[in-house]
Amino acid sequence: MTAIDDIVENFTLLDEWDDRYRYLIELGRTLPPLADSDHTEANKVRGCASQVWLVTHVKPDGAAGPVLQFEGDSDAHIVRGLIAILFALYSGKGARDILATDALALFEKLGLRENLTPQRSNGLRSMVERIRADAETALSAVA
């Protein structure tokens, strides 16, 4: 998976939206395939125009709190790219760090939010809310 700092740097080098769009699709292609058995209603993210599945794995990490790993998929190439950016930002991080990180501000910085359709923007918010909810659930389970 591409590191979030590398993604931010690459986006700053791309001036044209078409180039950013192609890069977003390329990032989506780097997502490992999600097992067919994980394409379930329980893993589906509500509020997305495209179909999006998100699987969260929680690893207890002692005093530092739980660490979350994510897997996901979508039936839309651009959305797979958005998922790849979210995973670069959040996967492998502690629940407290996830809750302290503003993904929507990052997407604004990358110049993506103004170029997403309202439906895609709503879907992005739904994915971020799901990840944050999973982090909150993981924290409350250890409290």
Image (tube, rainbow, N blue to C red):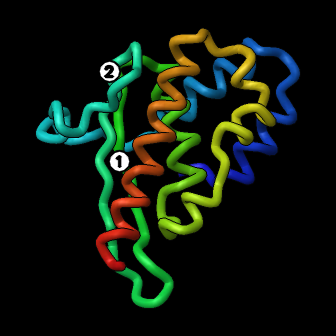
Residue at mark 2: 51
Q: Position of residue 84 (x, y in %)?
A: 52, 40
In which quadrant of the rendered view does residue 85 lie?
A: top right
Q: Is residue 26 left or right of residue 8?
A: left
Q: Is residue 29 left or right of residue 104?
A: left
Dot 2 surroundings within 10 Å: few (below 14), some, or many (20 or more)?
A: some
Q: Residue at x 80, y 36 (%)?
A: 109
Q: Residue at x 53, y 31 (%)?
A: 125
Residue at mark 1: 71
Q: Residue farthest to the left?
A: 37
Q: Position of residue 63 (x, y in %)?
A: 46, 90
Tell me the kind of residue under disc 1.
Glu
Dot 1 surroundings within 10 Å: few (below 14), some, or many (20 or more)?
A: some
In which quadrant of the rendered view does residue 45 lie?
A: top left
Q: Position of residue 93 (x, y in %)?
A: 52, 66
Tell me the kind of residue under disc 2.
Gln
Pick whichever, 122 or 28, lies toward us: 122
Pick whichever, 35 or 107, lies toward us: 107
Q: Residue at x 63, y 60 (%)?
A: 100
Pick whichever, 14 or 126, lies toward us: 126
Q: Is residue 50 left or right of residue 117?
A: left
- Classify the position of the C terminus by image quarter: bottom left
